[in-house]
Amino acid sequence: MIDSYPKAKKRYLDHQNRIIDYKIIKELNEAHKWPIDFMCKVLKVSRAAYYKRSKRSDSDRDRENMMILDTIKDIVASNNSLFGSIKMTYAINKKLDTNYNHKRIYRLMCINDIRSSFRRKKKYNYKRSAPEVTAENILNRDFSTTRPNEKWCTDVTEFPIPNSDKKLYLSPIIDLYDDCIVHYEISKRNDNQLVFNTLDNAIIKENKATPILHDDRGSQYTTQAFKAKLESYGIIHSMSRVSKCIDNGPCENVQGIIKDMMAVLYPNIQNEEELIEAIDKTIKYYNEENPMKRFKGKTPSEVRKEAKYSKTPIIYPIPKNPGIEKFWAKIEKAKEKERQVILQNI
């Protein structure tokens, strides 16, 4: 059983078992005058370690760990255990104005059985449509940016309404500089007006910004009307390749985060009104309360605010994704194998 525990938990349990051995030795020595040397040999305990432990009292670090643990429990209670060890570290350091290492926070969470409730869904279903117009994949999976409002991405995702056979549709626009949800609209209908309103209000909110806008080949984005609207704003349109959801990966990722985050923060939604309120509050939480490793513990809103007030915004490189690299390596390997087969048949 214990072998299935994480390393930190096993070491903690081993340490606790050793403390129990020390207590047994002390009690038997005081009550029955059993020799300490003999008991140490039987229990395979170092005699020096026993005496060292018997003289030890709670250290400053022990008391600090208890204080950190209390803070962890407060944060867990506030967001239904949404954060893992990395984001918990950011939240604690911000709350206590400290600089604790994430390994220490992980260890405290692990030994106290505090786990994140956050889970990612990997299933994706692509629905083909007959487009009126299409655009080139100008972005070409280059998601790096140097400032806000340089590259945006968008998509529409659905939320089933609890205790109903109806759905709500969320249309967000995400800035690739800070992963911030610039603007979003919620509607009962997945139609052109939904994406038009999203774009119009995002442009107004961001003072007539003219970014590259990337989306997938959903029917709303492949109409002449949407193309005309983008041209009127002076926005360059970029579009994913057919059946390549990976081309709009950042938007897919943020939408997944919002859904999973909402499931943790608001697990007992009962109707449409509560669902709309939960979506609104979750997006606000994501933008303003969600520390991110890429931004060194800052939230998307903090990064965006700093960049807008700076002449030379900080550039946050996108970390390499081993899963993506493995995916493309697999594709290249398959292509090379196919080439070799063709050459052998010539």
Image: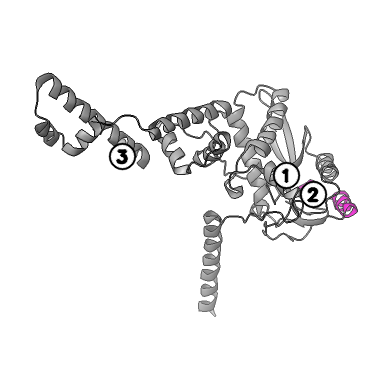
Q: Earlier in the sequence, mark 1 or mark 3?
A: 3
Q: Quadrant of the N terminus?
A: top left
Residue at point 55% right, 55% down?
321
Disc 1 from disc 2: Cα separation: 30 Å
| Residue 217, placed above or below residue 256 | below
Q: Amino acid at mark 1?
A: Lys
Inspect this view and state whether residue 126 appears: no
Tell me which colouring the rendered structure shows.
Answer: one colour
Q: Earlier in the sequence, mark 1 or mark 2?
A: 2
Task: Look at the image and give the residue range highlighted in magenta.
Answer: 218-233
Answer whether labels 1 and 2 touch (C-beta < 8 Å): no
Residue 305: which numbered mark, if any? 1
x, y percent for residue 73: 50, 27
Q: Is residue 40 left or right of residue 171?
A: left
As for residue 102 lying within the magenta part, the answer is no
What type is the residue that disc 2 sits on?
A: Tyr
Question: SS for tag 3?
Answer: helix
Q: Which residue is mark 3?
A: 3
The alpha-carbon separation of the residues under discs 1 and 3 comes to 47 Å
Rendering coords of residue 203 (x, y %): 84, 46
